[in-house]
Image: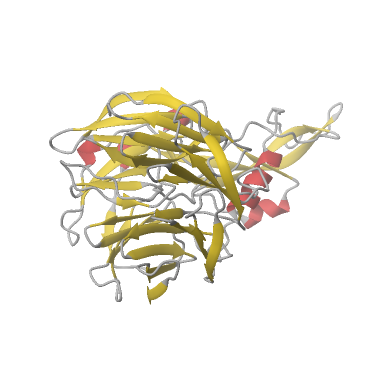
Amino acid sequence: MHPKSKKMPRLLFSFILLLLVSCTKNSFVDPETEESTGRKATQVAYYIPQYAAPNQGVLKAEQLDPKPLEETGKIVYYENYIFINKPQEGIHIVDNSDPSNPINEAYLSLKGNIDISIIDGFLYADQFSALVVLDVRDIENIQFIESYSVPQIFNYDRYWAFDHNERAEDYEYVRFENIDDTQGIVVGWELEIRWENIPKNHYFFLDGFTQNFDSTALALEEVQSDASVISQAGSLARFLPIDGYLYVLNQWELILFEIDDNYQPLRFGKTPLNNNAETLFQLNDFLFIGTTTGMLLYDVTSPTNPEFISSVDHFRSCDPVVADEDYAYVTLRGGTNCFTTRNELQIITLEDPKNLEVISSQLLFNPHGLAIHENHLIVCDGTAGIKVVDVSNREKPEVVNTYSIPFAYDVLIDYPSAIVVGDGKLYQYDISKLPELELISN
């Protein structure tokens, strides 16, 4: 899924970064000065962040000719169009009027983007730390509404534009200069060589570097609104329209925007979640929030005032969630990003919303997105392909079919079709004969 380039793989880079950021501050020295007591003058390679202010053209979008799907992220479906995020880069727009022959129609360059949602032809997206809005009612002439941008909302990946510089390999010490968010959005990194006095027998220590690694998010069922036509999403979505409001997640908090009559987002309110939140899913008056340590359940009868009901905890992992009238379905994924080795499906009864209980589980390989249709779950199980799980007996879920594809990442249902993305490809299946899936196009 990662294009072959000079860029370090994200996990490897993040691990190395932890080792290179030092708790010790060393003064700059004159390179002509020889060793002082207990120190030596050494050249240090520094990566220096490059900044741009939002009003310097960082928040923008550009409509381009279609590009091949290489790295696929989150997906939404809106009025016969599939919008597929390319993490941190932009959005592929696919005309799906004929599911047997989807047409890659356009590409929208939108740097720093991960999540999207659409309300009545207006697309809401994160772009670095800002919430931005685009008018997509005319796919051939998409408009970026600059005056609708809301700055400083999201904790974004400040290392999104990092490129490993081969020159740094010539130096024993490599460091990253601290980021100052008051200077703007980080749009690049430059290498600078400095002389410093380094203590002899100097060791590097782990510093407080944190990042939201997991861009593998999806969410699922179509959320109905009497007043608006809104997009469907996969099961790891962080954006969710609810009755004239846009709910968004920013790690440890839930933020609400009121969408006014002109579709401009207005800051409305926010509430702490006390958990690192990853996904949103609504069913009737219930809001399900998947977090790295469990599932949270909220009452959104009043969309302006979500009320916490209860939660169910699990070991730290990546945690998308979907639900039907009586049960919630959670996949736990292990791996380096998710801080656990558990890979399984859990089924949670909603019989008593104030006392949630896990009633069963099913072993999986490395699950990502999932979708529910009646008595069957469709689970994207990473390199293990697509799994169809029979949940007619919720206490004894059973994998009844497996469909091999290189990587299954995200899924949403537009019955009788299931749309799956993964490894730079788009797959569509006829699910009218579940548990059998019939390939329509790829």
Q: How many marks?
A: 0
Residue 68 visible to the viewer: no
Q: How is the image coloured?
A: secondary structure
Q: Is residue 365 left or right of residue 55?
A: right
The percent coordinates of residue 284 (x first, y second) are 31, 38
Above-or-below relation of 27 to 399: above
Is the C terminus in the top left, top right, bottom left or bottom right quadrant? bottom left
Relative to 366, residue 124 above or below: above
Most distant residue in the left direction: 261
Using residue 166 as the reference point, say whether residue 242 is left or right of it. Answer: left
Residue 113 versus residue 33: which sits nearer the camera? 113
**Identity of the residue drawn at 72% across and 42% down:** 43
Residue 18, horizontal then vertical, whole percent: 67, 40
Residue drawn at 86 percent across, 26 percent down: 37
- Vertical arrangement, residue 260 with respect to residue 214, above or below: above
In terms of image quadrants, where is residue 80? bottom left
Asked which quadrant contains residue 106, the reply is: bottom left
Residue at image coords 72%, 53%: 170
Q: Position of residue 434 (x, y in %)?
A: 41, 66
Q: Is residue 258 left or right of residue 41?
A: left
Q: Nearer the viewer, residue 439 or 166?
A: 439
Choose between 274 and 170: the one closer to the eye: 274
The answer to whether residue 198 is visible is yes
Q: Quadrant of residue 397?
A: bottom right
Residue 373 position within the rendered picture, expressed as x and y whole percent measured from the top left: 38, 56
